[in-house]
Image: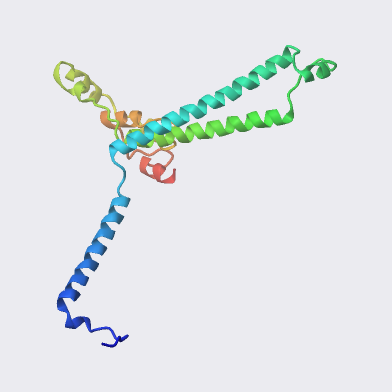
């Protein structure tokens, strides 16, 4: 027998051809299943475990930051008490002052901390609002159902109050608790305030 570079015609072996086609279909199906599995969010248990790990890491980072603040406090207190080397040099002026870079650092920390905690509250509220619910049904049932009837006797929440609460929720200042309460007891969601409805204000925000 001599070797040849000419490959046999697959059509001559229908069983082999059919098996190869099945293998390709199986491979494509496995790839699609892998892609769909990767696109799915994690399980509740996995997310909860990741949240707890982040909480521990965040608490440790905050503790280290506080230790740095306490160290600066001690150094400045020692300087005021005359223990620091620069205290004697500054004593001739009569007043001890910090450096300009100290002021810049503290101002930067204030801005960073404010922005960070504002964003952190906003993102935590996104998760919280997906699961947190306010149950007001007890005010409309049983012996206290008169409370619910009395609430509904009042006029709906004014457009001004509703849009103010909605804006606070959209900007992350407040959670959705107040907004849900307004919707529960009745509010004029189509009321105009400055020529805008609540929906238009939400779009513009």
Q: Quadrant of residue 167?
A: top left
Q: Which residue appears farthest toward the front when viewing the image? A: 1
Q: Is residue 40 above or below residue 107?
A: below
**Rendering coords of residue 95 (x, y %):** 79, 16
Question: Colour scheme of this structure image?
Answer: rainbow
Q: Is residue 31 left or right of residue 201?
A: left
Name the residue at 15% across, 78% down. 14
Q: Quadrant of residue 23?
A: bottom left
Q: Does residue 196 appear anywhere in the picture?
A: no
Foreground of the two, 102 or 172: 102
Q: Is residue 17 left or right of residue 102?
A: left
Name the residue at 25% across, 59% down. 30
Name the residue at 19% across, 22% down. 138
Q: Is residue 67 left or right of residue 167?
A: right
**Rendering coords of residue 123 (x, y %):** 41, 37
Foreground of the two, 70 or 190: 70
**Rendering coords of residue 159 (x, y %):** 36, 34
Q: Is residue 31 above or below residue 74?
A: below
Q: From the image, which quarter does the N terminus lie in?
A: bottom left
Q: Does residue 80 appear anywhere in the picture?
A: yes
**Rendering coords of residue 7 (x, y %):** 27, 83
Q: Quadrant of residue 18?
A: bottom left
Q: From the image, which quarter does the C terminus lie in?
A: top left
């Amino acid at each position: 027998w001599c070797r040849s570079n000419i490959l046999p015609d697959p059509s001559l072996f229908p069983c082999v051809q059919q098996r190869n086609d099945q293998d390709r279909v199986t491979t494509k199906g496995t790839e699609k299943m892998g892609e769909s599995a990767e696109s799915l969010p994690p399980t509740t248990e996995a997310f909860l475990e990741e949240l707890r790990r982040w909480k521990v890491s965040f608490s440790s980072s905050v503790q280290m930051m506080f230790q740095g603040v306490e160290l600066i406090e001690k150094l400045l207190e020692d300087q005021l008490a005359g223990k620091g080397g620069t205290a004697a040099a500054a004593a001739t002026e009569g007043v001890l002052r910090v450096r300009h870079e100290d002021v810049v650092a503290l101002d930067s920390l204030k801005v960073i901390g404010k922005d960070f905690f504002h964003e952190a509250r906003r993102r935590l509220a996104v998760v919280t609002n997906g699961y947190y619910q306010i149950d007001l049904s007890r005010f409309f049932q049983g012996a206290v159902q008169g409370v619910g009837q009395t609430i509904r006797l009042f006029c709906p929440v004014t457009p001004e109050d509703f849009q103010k609460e909605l804006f606070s929720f959209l900007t992350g200042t407040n959670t959705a608790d107040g907004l849900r309460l307004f919707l529960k007891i009745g509010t004029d969601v189509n009321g105009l305030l400055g020529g805008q409805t609540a929906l238009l204000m939400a779009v513009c925000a």
